Image: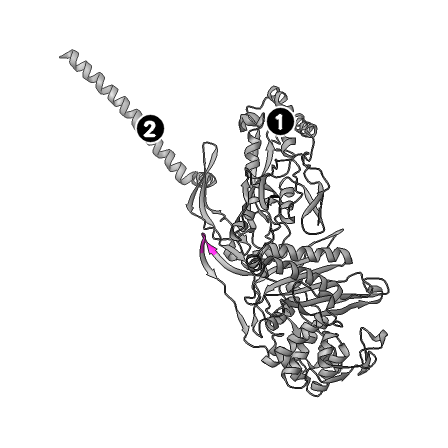
Amino acid sequence: MTKNSDINRKIQREYFIVTLIFGAMVVAIIARAVVISFVEGDFWRELGDKKIQTGIPIPAARGNIYSDNYELMATSESRYRLYLDFWAEGVSEDTLRKYINPLSRELHRMFPEKPAAAYKADIMKGWKQRSPRNREYPLNISEVNYLQLKAIRKMPFFRQGKNKSGLYERSFVKRIKPYGSLASRTIGDIYGEADKGGRSGLEMGFDSLLRGKQGVGTRQRVQGRYIQVTEKNPVPGCDIISTIDVNMQDITERALLEKLKEQDAESGTAALMDVKTGEIKAITNLGRRGNGWGETTNYAVADMSEPGSTFKVASMMVALDDGLVAPNDLVDTGNGIFEYAGAVLREHNAGRGGFGMITAAQSIWFSSSIGVAKIILKAYENNPGKYVDGLYRLGFNRDLKLDIPGYGIARVRHPKISPNTWYRTTLPWMSFGYETQIPPIYTLTFFNAIANNGMMVKPIFVKEIRENGRMKEKRDRVVLKKHICSDVTLRHIREMLDNTVNHPQGTGRPARSELVRISGKTGTVQLSQGAAGYKEGGLSHQVSFCGYFPSDDPQYSCIVVVRKPSSDNPSGGDICGKVFKRIAEDVFVQRVSGSLLLAASKRSAMPKMPCVKSGLSEHTKYVMDKLDVKYVDKLESEWMSVRTADDRILFDSREIKDNRTPNVVGMGAKDAVYAMENVGLRVDLKGQGTVVAQSIPPGGRARKGKTVVLQLK
């Protein structure tokens, strides 16, 4: 018994000790919990907040902007800047020196703008200057896309992975324009590399739709790494389908640029509009940049300048529609010098004796400022407000509510609204295009209404909005005014515009085409004089031409404006009319006449073999199939050469290698430029038609950034 009692007492003591220990631990835990909660609570809560971050915005993918046939005009792309961390745990000098030569050669092969030795020297310099305080040595190459990043990761040394090579990247989102400067000001730009909102053009006008809705996430630090959890998914932005036709845009921009170079002009504008729908198919705004010209201000919608003689058509339409003049009424323009209210008006042919007695219609053909001024003075001198009311009927005072932010609204003064700035000379000078400020898009809209049987439609730049690939909104034609004038007045005006171009003495004669009949009106306005002028002691002018084609069944209207040309005697017909003619002929051949030429070809007993250019095969084969033209396909690549044999068209493969100068002889301009720029070369085109020669022989290594001259004929 005694022995058992001793054992029990021993067990009880041990239980007591264990219980005492556990009790002390519980008390300690409770005490620590109290201290943590009430004494150290703020410290630990702050530390927890640092490790868990809530409400982190997750940016949405910005929508794309497309051309009218769904070619990308603006899109967002992930780009990467590369760095080396020479203090990464696995980086070894022996391994670096072992692979530096093959690595440098691979970098040169991908980025040939620098020799391999330069890449080697730069990397070894970083190794020698390594510091634990600066573990971010930039790899001295330009930003790369994802495919390039993948290729770089497979290069010698870098293929070992981030820990052993120290290579890592920082990503950012960049807005790119696959067609470069083509319609760049109209497409617009965004702020910064990442999307901080639209800054100009359609990017700004449709920013709320393009940017989408950002998501929300939580970021938490776990075992030394940050993990982000998405709580609310971002909603991608909508896609914008513009009205821009890439081919027409290219035609328009090229024609204008060549004239600016020829005239050494300060800037120029050209816009092409679909007569029936109001869709802007092409719009280019080129301003001087250093030794060349590039897309700058959107002059077409924002330039508040005096329109000059194109405005005479509006004055004549008002007077005709009010029944105060008839086309055959005579007006005496004298010797080309007219003095009124102490001001002298000098005709552009005053040095040759003026026009003398002419008809009202001829005052438009010959662009007689005195003729138009006398007609308007006779009709409205005692009631100038009626004349301005007539201009307002034509839409020159309305807000067009364009899709492009920053657009201007025409300013045409009214004697009752602005009596303090209305003078005796205002009426006659306003009649031929001075004393007003009208953006080119307004003039184009007015002439487009003339072409569209008197119906004025709003210029539109966007025709569709798509969300997740589905139609969200379709933008149809917007009619601003069903009839800008009577049918009789419209007929007279269209005859005048036809004769301005096609009459032997019309000022628009340089725009006359044997291929497509053109109607339109020239414009010239003086901008400045004296030492402040474009040339010392001379005059500074703005010249223009606005019209439509084909005259009998108008499909497109167009305006061309050139500011400060170097010509001593600038003419809207000789400068802008020729640009208009080239645009009209190229567009007519490409679009308007296609069905007519095809019909004629099918009706011919011995049809001619069509002229087919070398280039990308997919589109050419599609067209040949649509036209039901037979050909023999021997293609094994996407590029082709074309030859004829035994009255057959043969397509042979043309090999174009990466980083090698391609052979583009026989190609059209578009495919040739694409092939050259695809290997990093810059292109300077001379002439038009088909490539007949290239300044850099094919087959050699393409040096990125070098310019190749292509001769077209």
Any part of residue 306 in sight: no
**Residue drawn 64% across and 43% down?**
677
When the figure is inspected, residue 218 is found, relative to residue 242, above or below; the finding is: above
The x, y position of residue 273, in whole percent, is 60, 64
Q: Callout 1, which amino acid?
A: Leu
Query: Circle 2: is it few (<14), some (14-19), or many (20+) Cα within 10 Å?
Result: few
In this view, the residue in front, 600 or 64, is 600
Query: Element under label 1?
Result: helix
When the figure is inspected, residue 444 is found, relative to residue 655, above or below; the finding is: below
When the figure is inspected, residue 100 is found, relative to residue 652, above or below; the finding is: above
User: Dominant secondary structure of the magenta stretch?
Assistant: strand
- Image quarter (top left, top right, bottom left or bottom right) of the N terminus: top left
The x, y position of residue 464, in whole percent, is 50, 59
In this view, the residue in front, 517 or 204, is 517
Q: Nearer the viewer, mark 2 or mark 1?
A: 1
Query: Element under label 2?
Result: helix
Q: Callout 2, which amino acid?
A: Met
Instruction: Give the quarter of the image for residue 113.
Output: top right
**Residue drawn 75% across and 63% down?**
575
Q: Which residue is the site of mark 1?
A: 103
Any part of residue 171 in sight: yes
Instruction: Give the quarter of the image for residue 127.
Output: top right
Span highlighted in magenta in the image: 466-470
Query: Circle 1: is it few (<14), some (14-19), or many (20+) Cα within 10 Å?
Result: many
Q: Which mark is residue 707?
A: none
- Report if the CB atoms under discs 2 and 1 are less than 8 Å apart: no
